[in-house]
């Protein structure tokens, strides 16, 4: 009898101490759109890169996470293409980079988005993302 009273008391204590505890896991940060988009064919020349996210991001977390490469046959990067941070629109969760050199005609490119980008909420991008696109001849 004493054992059942002790068990009841402990159960009551732990239930009241924990309350309605919930485990909260933030939703992942999502890359919702990009320009150029996956598989896009754009004119050669000067362009900007735009990346839209599902929520506000920590701008400092972009450091070293966005790269543009010109590709040879077989998706092998042949040279990096310089990107310069231009702006971040907090209302649209969109970051814009200026491509520092004109894109050459008839070439394939890969835009790489690193996985270390973090949202203000603490959410992280789930894995690195790649967007391949080409310039018209």
Image (cartoon, rainbow, N blue to C red):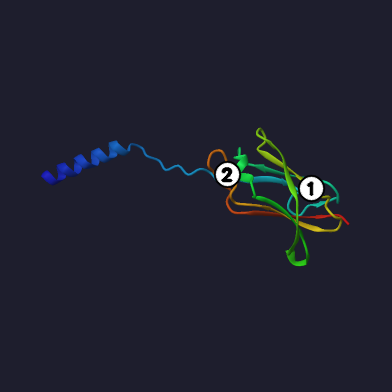
The reply, left or right, for residue 98 in relation to residue 113 is right
Residue 96 at x, y percent in the picture: 72, 41
Front residue (pair 45, 37): 45
Residue at image point 75% right, 50% down: 82
Residue at image point 78% right, 52% down: 40
Distance (Cα) linking label 1 and label 2: 25 Å
Residue at image point 79% right, 47% down: 100
Q: Foreground mark, 1 or 2?
A: 1
Residue 81 at x, y percent in the picture: 76, 53
Residue 79 at x, y percent in the picture: 76, 59
Q: Which quadrant is the C terminus positioned in?
A: bottom right
| Residue lying at the far right of the rendered structure | 137
Q: Quadrant of residue 20?
A: top left
| Residue lying at the far left of the rendered structure | 1
Instruction: Say whether residue 1 is visible.
Output: no
**Mark 1: which secondary structure?**
loop
Would you place residue 74 above or below residue 84 in this image?
A: below
Task: Name the disc covering residue 118, or none.
Answer: 2
Residue 66 at x, y percent in the picture: 68, 50
- Residue tagged by mark 1? 100
Residue at image point 69% right, 41% down: 95
Would you place residue 75 above or below residue 37 in this image?
A: below
Disc with the residue nearer the chain's start (1 vs 2): 1
Front residue (pair 83, 32): 83
Instruction: Say whether residue 52 is visible.
Output: yes
């Amino acid at each position: 009898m004493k054992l059942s009273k002790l068990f009841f008391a402990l159960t009551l204590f732990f239930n009241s101490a924990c309350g309605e505890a919930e485990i909260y896991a933030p939703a992942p940060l999502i890359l919702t759109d990009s320009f150029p988009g996956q598989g896009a064919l754009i004119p050669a020349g000067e362009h900007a890169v735009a990346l839209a996210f599902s929520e506000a991001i920590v701008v400092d977390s972009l450091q070293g996470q966005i790269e543009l490469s010109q590709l040879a046959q077989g998706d092998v990067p042949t040279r990096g293409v310089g990107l310069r941070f231009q702006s971040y629109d907090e209302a649209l969760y969109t970051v814009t980079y200026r491509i520092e050199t004109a894109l050459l005609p008839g070439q394939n490119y890969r835009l790489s988005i690193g996985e270390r980008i973090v949202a203000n909420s603490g959410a992280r991008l789930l894995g690195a993302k790649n967007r391949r696109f080409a310039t018209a001849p």
